[in-house]
Amino acid sequence: MTDVPGPRSSQLLVRREAAVARAVSTMLPVFVTRAGGGVIEDVDGNSLIDFGSGIAVVGVGNAAAHVVAGVQEQVAQFTHTCFMITPYEGYVAVCEELARLTPGDHEKRSALFNSGAEAVENAVKVARAHTGRQAVVVFDHAYHGRTNLTLALTAKNMPYKHTFGPFAPEVYRMPMAYPYRWPTGPDRCGPEAAAAVISAIDKQVGAEDVACVLIEPIQGEGGFVVPGEGFLPALAEYCRENGIVFAADEVQTGFGRTGAWFACEHEGVVPDLVATAKGIAGGLPLAAVTGRAEIMDSVHVGGLGGTFGGNPVACAAALGAIRTIEEQDLVAAARRIGEVMLARLRQLQRRHPAVGDVRGRGAMVAVELVEPGTTTPDPAMTQAVARACHSAGLVVLTCGTFGNVLRFLPPLVIPDHLLAEGLDLVDQAFAAVSGRGQVAAPV
Ligand SMILES: Cc1ncc(COP(=O)(O)O)c(C=O)c1O
């Protein structure tokens, strides 16, 4: 292992600085030559263990065989015609797969796009067109993207919203069922938060004016917040009773990541609309809105689309990724990864009082760092542990409204020994950063 970054990456960084806008940040400045199977190789010959999956994208790996084969075949046939001009089968096949895999056995329709933000924007368009209403309900700690409407939907100012307003109107932010930080404790969080949200919608917005309630079934950038039990079902029920579209942003949680095809399934919730992206196509840019046929088809002809949306190469990649998830049963793999990570991180919590909370589902797991004995966020320690992991050759990401969450998103194909090695490195990073050595673990 060279220093991180090594000499060649450092040279490329100089070129990067002169050519790439500095606003596009880089968390770990090593330049990649190859990646796959939970390993990222850089231009200096270093091998890093990947606990980030390019932000929850390459669950199937960075060069999954079916994805590569599908892409190669398609790219040699044609790269683009535009589905809105002359269609092709791959687009239809992806929509059929989405109808089969997303929660609920009702009739569904899908439309394909390029990014998670674009999918979320279109979900809002569909909900507004269907209901004839304008208001959109979103939540504290939400992250839905970086376009103007999705910034309005996103909760966090820095770095996402700062200086970029004004933002789109008719967006109403509600409390999130955040068990670790719920005043009366995690057990009461789900029902109490649902009651608070429903009361606020009724009083401040008016149910009859709400087009959709939009929620990440497990929050991603906001801190891997798994909502208190009962919160999602109560909101879905309220939406049903009031003609409100319940829209799930499964951009980060979809395609097996949480140990189910979609995170809504953990509580048996069937959303009216689902936005997907990230893990859908093994690393190629593709996104979708899938929903009840009568809702999706209430939009006028020509109202949805885009030049590149549902690009044939991206569709071929998606079909390859879905086949990989099914053939290798990566949904079950995600569950196993979750069991291993949660067990190890709970051990870590017993040794390090700075670990306030360990949470997550499947291969979407995080630790929240606080000043010992309090719930005061400790973003400095979080950064220090992340940096120690990076120096040791482990790619980990941070997140959270308070910048104090270390999140782990290994590819679902990661072999057991690499998962264990990565967790050893996390352990060592905590030991090094806490400096004071490790507190003896209670048995
Ligand atoms: C839950 C969620 N929604 C939307 C987005 C935006 O997706 P994209 O970056 O592809 O626009 C993200 C990205 O992190 C996300 O996690």
Image (tube, rainbow, N blue to C red):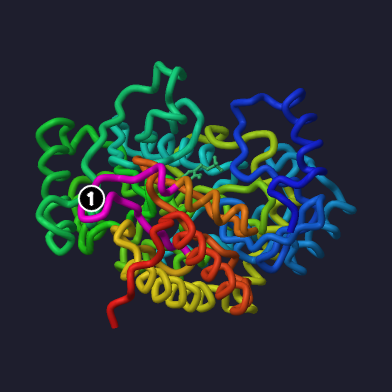
Against 369, is 365 above or below? below
Residue 28 image offset from top left, x and y in percent: 63, 45
**Residue at x 43%, y 34% (from the top left corner):** 125
Residue labelled with disc 1: 375
Q: In this rendered view, identify the residue nearer to me: 382 or 153.
A: 382
Q: In this rendered view, identify the residue nearer to me: 249 or 412.
A: 412
Question: Is 73 on the left or on the right of 89, as rendered?
Answer: right
Q: In this rendered view, identify the residue nearer to me: 195 or 159.
A: 159
Q: How crowded is mark 1: few (under 14 residues within 10 Å), some or many (20 or more)?
A: some
Residue 6 image offset from top left, x and y in percent: 76, 47
Against 255, is 223 above or below? above
Quarter containing the C terminus: bottom left
Magenta stretch: give its range: 364-382
Residue 286 image offset from top left, x and y in percent: 63, 48
Question: Is 201 on the left or on the right of 309, as rendered?
Answer: left
Determine the image quadrant of residue 138.
top left
